Amino acid sequence: MAQVSKIELDTSAMQEYARFLKQAPKIAREEMERSVEEALRLLKHEIQENTPTGAHGHLRGSITHQLRGQALSDGLGVVGTVGSSLNYALSVELGTKPHKVSIEGQVALREWVEKKLGIDPSRSASVAFLIARKISKKGTKGARMAGRALDDNAAQVNQIVAAAVPRIVARLQGGA
């Protein structure tokens, strides 16, 4: 999903994190990375659940997450991404304007018609043709798999990330 979406975090937790980052940068960074990794796993799972499956389920299986440290000027940067490297992921997420369906797309539609709709191979080409014609006139509706995952889980992501602060405190006090 090439579209960039962000979740806004509670700034009070971030202010505490910034204070701990100066006091104990290694511990603060480790705990924030742990929280961001947990949030990424949640979002990846939710996006996969929201992703429509085609004939082979390639899109759902292509969704990955990655934690990336990022040196920002304020030193707070822990960045993570969830997405797919497949070239059609963004079109599924956002939908498309009316367009001609390529030969490869028609073959994929035919496979989808057979596997997902259970249409007999002797009829699948004509059904795929009708779907391709509709796409050429109306486009496609976006599935919003990432958008819905972010909308539905923003509060939980905030809680996961904010949980880094008490873990930092516990470690500084000699706990875990």
Image (cartoon, rainbow, N blue to C red):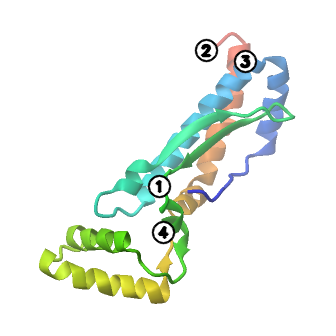
**Residue depicted at 61% across the width and 46% down the height:** 157
Task: Pick whichever of labels 3 and 4 is earlier in the sequence.
Answer: 3
Disc 3 marks a residue whose amino acid type is Lys
Q: Which residue is mark 4?
A: 143
**175 and 76: which one is in front?**
76
Q: Are marks 2 and 1 in contact (CB under 8 Å)?
A: no
Disc 2 marks a residue whose amino acid type is Ala
Residue 176 is tagged as 2
Residue 86 is tagged as 1
Residue 171 is tagged as none
Residue 16 appears in the figure: yes
Task: Pick whichever of labels 1 and 4 is earlier in the sequence.
Answer: 1
Task: Pick whichever of labels 2 and 1 is earlier in the sequence.
Answer: 1
Whole-number angstrom distance, CA of label 1 to CA of label 3: 36 Å
Q: Which residue is mark 3?
A: 26
Look at the picture and state if 171 lies above or below 144. above
Label 1 environment density (alpha carbons within 10 Å; few <14, some 14–19, many ≥20): few
Label 4 environment density (alpha carbons within 10 Å; few <14, some 14–19, many ≥20): some
Disc 1 is placed on an element classified as loop
Which callout, 4 or 2, points to the residue nearer the camera?
4
Q: Are marks 4 and 2 in contact (CB under 8 Å)?
A: no
- Give residue 10's position: percent from left, percent from top: 76, 46
Q: Are marks 3 and 2 in contact (CB under 8 Å)?
A: no
Disc 3 is placed on an element classified as helix
The answer to whether residue 69 is left or right of residue 115 is right
Q: Residue furthest bottom?
A: 137
Disc 4 marks a residue whose amino acid type is Ala
Whole-number angstrom distance, CA of label 4 to CA of label 2: 42 Å
Task: Count the labels in the image.
Answer: 4
- Give residue 66's position: percent from left, percent from top: 56, 38
